[in-house]
Image: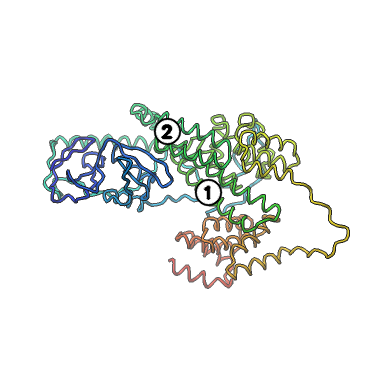
């Protein structure tokens, strides 16, 4: 039975008796094309090519495609899942995970190795956050040497870095020497083909050497012109249109607008796979949602209200910010100099209040401040959270505001900063501007309610009974520890967070939070808490022990061993020292 490769038209002859009823996906031995081989009247298999098919995702989004290779690519890129459904007529739908010929592609996705790239604070001990700040250059921007720590939590990829995908497991490539389906007939001259292959190998070797010697020149002289000639670098206009509409929605900053924006972003990514701007914008949408949860918890904590709800909101924010980090990281890897990608990653560090740990990224972003009007505002807001550079951050914010007066998420943080620093009238002006374009903006409404909150009445002259004295910090720590011992982790976590509201440098509270997050199986957040302790006191043995336990839970063998050893160096007689020694023996 004859089949042709749909790309290079190489002919193959397969034995019909060896073709399973559901068909089989094969890869052409002459080109990278993947195509499906199935019997003419087979049932249950998705044919290689049809007029038009439709994908319906579990979230309700629908996409259309014409070729099986498009669907296979979407599976490998994780744009569709086993639970999504496919249909040709629109009336009969099949789950992708139930189609046998797609099983090998889903298995390939499951076997892909996850990149070793982690969010902020998931690293070994870092040097002190700042040295003596240098003077600033013209324009109010800080000099980028001497006051940020050495590279630690996040390293931006080098320009022109190419991330090689994990090889995808494929069925056997059928050659004359190995033929399980029958004799393969090739319409190629053997000698001529060998000459061509040798010639191509020589060209590829020379091209590879050129790339290794000077990657930037290689990109400008070869990759960019070839991509332009083939039209690879062109962006689908409809994808750009969808993304611009998503930007307008995100600028409103309320919950409904964010959901609309996410739908438009997914639409753009379906039209333009691996669209860097869309990845970056999706990360920003996640960060806005994370900000909404964090700020809601902040306003509750400022009035000592609903501590359990505060914990729930903070956990939701942590998950959203981690998702945003992964999206921003992928965008940076695809395009290291993309302003939207840099802006999204800086936004993540702003949300985590850890801009000092993004030194390589900040250095690069300072060269692109004129390419994106929102980038300097996001960077300025990040500086506002750092007492060492608050003045410079305020200068950047003031300069960037005129070009971003319709961006409500950024205006909220400017308004909040003004209110907390006594400029209530100016804060009210920004809040009114937000509510004029987004009447249901949750953050603006919360800030407005706070500014309008009446002053508490004066205490009565003669109280019937003296109010109980508030618990001291030591009493609160003992109470939280007792909750942990009784498996009341969330109650303990709420007490630790209350202590940190009063003193963000309390080591015992940070340690307690780390262990609570381990109990709740939020390992990355636990690592972040232990790392904060080490940033405060690099000789705190319990923090290294906590890091070791957390890394061991994530099966990070090298990190766990390193932190167990640091713990034993600092506290060889600690009650947990025997446990650490046994753990080292088990891991070695």
Using the rendered image of the protein, determine whether residue 511 is visible from the camera's viewpoint.
Answer: no
Query: At x 33% / y 51%, what residue is drawn?
Result: 97
The quarter of the image holding the N terminus is: top left
Discs 2/1, front: 1
Residue 19 image point, x, y percent? 17, 49
Question: How far apart, in angstroms, are the residues tagged by discs 2 and 1?
Answer: 35 Å
Give the side of residue 267 with respect to residue 8, left or right: right
Give the side of residue 574 with respect to residue 261, left or right: right
Query: At x 61% / y 49%, what residue is drawn?
Result: 294
The residue lying furthest to the right in this view is: 461
Give the side of residue 219 with respect to residue 318, left or right: left
Residue 429 quadrant: top right
The residue carrying mark 2 is 216
Query: Under tag 1, what secondary structure?
Result: helix
The residue lying furthest to the front in this view is: 91
The quarter of the image holding the C terminus is: bottom left
Q: Nearer the viewer, residue 350 or 469?
A: 469
Q: Is residue 141 above or below residue 507?
A: above
Label 2 vs 1, first from the N-terminus:
2
Q: Is residue 378 above or below residue 558?
A: above
Residue 311 image point, x, y percent? 60, 56
Query: At x 49% / y 43%, what residue is drawn?
Result: 328
Residue 262 image point, x, y percent? 49, 40
Q: Nearer the viewer, residue 230 or 447?
A: 447
The residue carrying mark 1 is 320
Query: Crowding at label 2, few (<14), some or many (≥20) Cα neighbours within 10 Å?
Result: some
């Amino acid at each position: 039975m004859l089949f042709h490769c749909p790309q290079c038209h190489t002919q193959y002859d397969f034995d019909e008796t060896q073709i399973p009823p559901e068909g089989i996906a094969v890869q052409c031995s002459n080109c990278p094309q993947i195509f499906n081989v199935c019997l003419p009247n087979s049932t249950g298999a998705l044919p290689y090519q049809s007029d038009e098919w439709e994908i319906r995702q579990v979230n309700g989004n629908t996409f259309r495609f014409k070729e099986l290779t498009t669907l296979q690519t979407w599976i490998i890129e994780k744009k569709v899942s086993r639970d999504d459904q496919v249909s040709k007529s629109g009336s009969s739908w099949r789950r992708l995970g139930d189609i046998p010929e797609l099983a090998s592609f889903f298995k390939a996705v499951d076997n892909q190795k996850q990149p070793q790239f982690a969010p902020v604070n998931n690293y070994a001990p870092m040097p002190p956050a700042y040295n003596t700040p240098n003077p600033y250059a013209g324009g109010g921007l800080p000099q980028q040497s001497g006051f940020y720590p050495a590279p630690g939590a996040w390293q931006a990829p080098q320009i022109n870095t190419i991330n090689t995908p994990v090889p995808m497991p494929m069925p056997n490539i059928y050659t004359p020497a190995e033929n399980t389906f029958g004799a393969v007939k090739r319409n190629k001259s053997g000698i001529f083909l060998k000459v061509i292959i040798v010639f191509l190998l020589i060209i590829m070797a020379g091209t590879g050497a050129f790339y290794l010697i000077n990657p930037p020149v290689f990109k400008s002289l070869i990759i960019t012109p070839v991509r332009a000639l083939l039209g690879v670098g062109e962006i689908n206009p409809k994808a750009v249109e969808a993304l611009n509409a998503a930007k307008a929605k995100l600028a409103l900053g309320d919950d409904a607008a964010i959901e609309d924006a996410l739908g438009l972003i997914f639409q753009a990514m379906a039209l333009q796979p691996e669209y860097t701007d869309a990845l970056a914008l999706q990360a920003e949408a996640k960060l806005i949602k994370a900000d909404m949860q964090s700020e809601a918890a902040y306003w509750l904590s400022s009035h000592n209200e609903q501590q359990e709800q505060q914990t729930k909101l903070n956990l939701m924010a942590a998950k959203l910010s981690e998702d945003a980090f992964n999206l921003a990281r992928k965008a940076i890897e695809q395009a290291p100099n993309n302003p939207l990608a840099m802006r999204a990653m800086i936004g993540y560090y702003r949300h985590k209040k850890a801009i000092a740990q993004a030194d390589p990224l900040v250095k690069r972003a300072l060269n692109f401040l004129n390419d994106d009007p929102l980038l300097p505002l996001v960077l300025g807001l990040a500086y506002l959270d750092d007492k060492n550079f608050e003045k410079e951050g305020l200068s950047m914010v003031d300069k960037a505001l005129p070009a971003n007066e319709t961006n409500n998420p950024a205006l909220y943080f400017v308004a909040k900063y003004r209110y907390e620093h006594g400029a209530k009238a100016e804060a009210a002006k920004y809040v009114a501007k937000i509510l004029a374009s987004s009447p249901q903006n949750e953050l603006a409404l919360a800030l407005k309610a706070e500014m309008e909150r009446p002053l508490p009445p004066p205490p009565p002259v003669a109280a019937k009974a003296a109010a109980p004295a508030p618990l001291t910090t030591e009493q609160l720590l003992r109470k939280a520890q007792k909750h942990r011992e009784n498996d009341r982790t969330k109650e303990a976590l709420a007490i630790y967070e209350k202590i940190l509201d009063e003193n963000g440098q309390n080591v015992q509270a940070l340690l307690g939070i780390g262990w609570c997050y381990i109990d709740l199986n939020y390992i990355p957040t636990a690592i972040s808490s232990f790392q904060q302790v080490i940033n405060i006191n690099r000789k705190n043995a319990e923090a290294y022990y906590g890091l070791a336990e957390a890394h061991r839970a994530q099966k990070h063998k090298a990190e766990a061993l390193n932190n167990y050893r640091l713990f034993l160096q600092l506290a060889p007689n600690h009650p947990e020292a025997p446990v650490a020694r046994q753990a080292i023996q088990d891991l070695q």
